[in-house]
Image: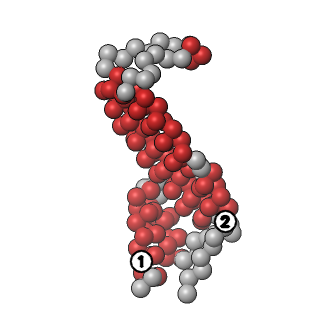
Amino acid sequence: MPLFLNESTAKRRFKDLLGQANHLLITILVGLSAVERRLITEAPPDLHTIWNPRDPIASAARSRMMLLDMTLVRATDAIDAYISWSRRAPAIIQSVDLQREIDSAQQSVLQKFRAIKIILLHLTR
């Protein structure tokens, strides 16, 4: 039977990276919604900038896409960091086969993730 840890340094550090991501994303989306509904039409004076888009709705839509891209990058980095931290002593990942697969993946987060997925599927059968 595999050992499952509820707490580890890797998990705490992973949570620190993503932390309040959902709350922060919702806050940004609320702000973009206000721009789309034209409740916000200018930048607040304390930002010390000029904001005057030709089409606030299109600008908000493009901003949503950038937000999604940045969120995916942050989540991918957090997963990669978690896998790396899980390999450090005391290692959470103790399967020699999985360690070898992760090491052979080098910089590919996708290959590391796939290696973990394959091993986990094998263990749960």
Q: Position of residue 1 (x, y in %)?
A: 55, 87
Circle 2 packing at 10 Å, graded few (<14), some (14-19), many (20+), is some
Q: Secondary structure at mark 1?
A: helix
Image quadrant where residue 59 sits = top left
Answer yes or no: is residue 84 visible: yes
Q: Position of residue 86 (x, y in %)?
A: 60, 64
Residue matched to label 1 = 121
Q: 118 or 14, which is in the foreground?
A: 14
Question: Which kind of residue does numbered mark 2 sit on?
Answer: Ser
Q: Earlier in the sequence, mark 1 or mark 2?
A: 2
Residue plotted at (45% across, 62% down): 112
Q: Secondary structure at mark 2?
A: loop
Circle 1 packing at 10 Å, graded few (<14), some (14-19), many (20+), is few
> In the rendered image of this protein, does residue 5 appear above or below residue 33?
below
Horizontal side, residue 121 vs residue 55: left or right: right
Horizontal side, residue 47 vs residue 115: left or right: right
Question: Which kind of residue does numbered mark 1 sit on?
Answer: Leu
**Tag shown at residue 112:** none
Contact check, label 1 and label 2, Cβ < 8 Å: no
Q: Position of residue 16 (x, y in %)?
A: 63, 51
Residue plotted at (53% across, 41% down): 24
Horizontal side, residue 37 vs residue 24: left or right: left
**CA distance for labels 1 and 2:** 22 Å
Residue plotted at (59% across, 50% down): 19
**Tag shown at residue 8:** 2
